[in-house]
Amino acid sequence: MNITEVARQSGLPAKTIRYYEEIGLIRPLRSSNGYRAFRDSDLHKLAFIGRARSLGFSIEDCRSLLALYEDKDRASADVKALAGRHLERIEAKLAELQAMQATLTQLVHACAGDARPDCPILTGLATGPACCA
Amino acid sequence: MNITEVARQSGLPAKTIRYYEEIGLIRPLRSSNGYRAFRDSDLHKLAFIGRARSLGFSIEDCRSLLALYEDKDRASADVKALAGRHLERIEAKLAELQAMQATLTQLVHACAGDARPDCPILTGLATGPACCA
DNA sequence: TATGGGGGTTCCAGTCACGGGAAGGTCAAG
DNA sequence: CTTGACCTTCCCGTGACTGGAACCCCCATA
């Protein structure tokens, strides 16, 4: 399989797939003409990585997840720990964004949004504590 | 005021303040020895930027907000529009993170987390749609 | 007067996960 | 033989900083 076909099937841009090879996440073969020759196993890995990325895992997390995936003697506890740490990061980020949303919603609500210059948003930014994040 | 004092009062790292000068967000004076000499107005701007950043506004948004803040003939509608667009971005990000959280929570919950290799997290990543984000 | 320490300065490189685009080789169809 | 779609590598840019090197400045103390 050539890269465009793999990109289509995995849903990842070709550029991204080349990048994943460059950083050693996948190691496709090469045809005699120099083109990358992807096996089904490469495609599966890419789909795996794509799903992990869509769950917000970092590239390094993906590397670890792939290694665990391929290690038949893994302990599920290791996978769970990795995913749990990631979940914590997501929840922290969620809390941060929710605080921003709360403050911003309040400010936007308080602003008349007309032609006059008076604006509680700007006043809030100029004087208030803005956000507890 | 020297940079360390401004950093202390604004809560921003000195490095960040230098960066903000470099990209033209602030223009502190210079003493004869080459040190940056911050006025109160510079400190106020930095505090303003810091609060806007803590609400998630991008640097370019901060530049616009500062311009509006200093324009006594602004229309509050312009500020509200800017903040509203930002609020939408935040809400989109929130939805994305919540979807991740939901999927991840489910997967982590389903995983025994013991010494055996069977792991629904890995199976999910290998086969499932993972996340609709 | 030397020196030591705690300011300050610039500039360069790295982060993360790619994306854009240039310059050029390869392949199948007409 | 040419066209056009593929493929390759290489390098630069993104956002918003952060770390570090190498160097200057100022004051106090021995």
Image (cartoon, coloured by chain):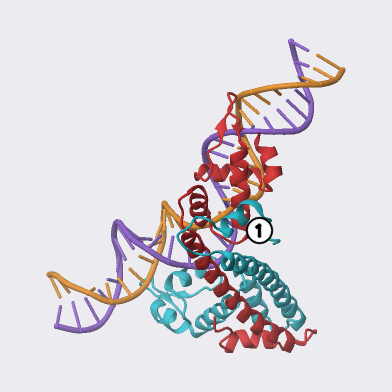
Chain colours: A cyan, B red, C purple, D orange
Q: Tell which of B89 and A83 is nearer to you.
A: B89
Image coordinates for residue A28, horizontal then vertical, percent? 49, 75
Report the residue at 66% width, 34% height from top.
B2
Q: Tell me where residue A102 sits by quadrant.
A: bottom right
Q: Tell which of A26 and A51 is nearer to you.
A: A51
Q: Tell me where residue C2 sits by quadrant.
A: top right
Q: Which residue is mark 1?
A: A130
Chain ID, mark 1: A
Question: On screen, B112 above or below B44?
Answer: below
Q: Residues within 10 Å of mark 1 (few under 14, many from 20)?
A: many
Report the residue at 72% width, 83% height from top.
B108
Image coordinates for residue A98, horizontal then vertical, percent? 65, 71
Report the residue at 38% width, 73% height from top.
A32
Image coordinates for residue B75, horizontal then vertical, percent? 46, 57
Image coordinates for residue A64, horizontal then vertical, percent? 66, 73
Q: Tell which of D29 and A120 is nearer to you.
A: A120
- Tell me the quarter of the image containing the N terminus of chain A: bottom left
Report the residue at 61% width, 61% height from top.
B55
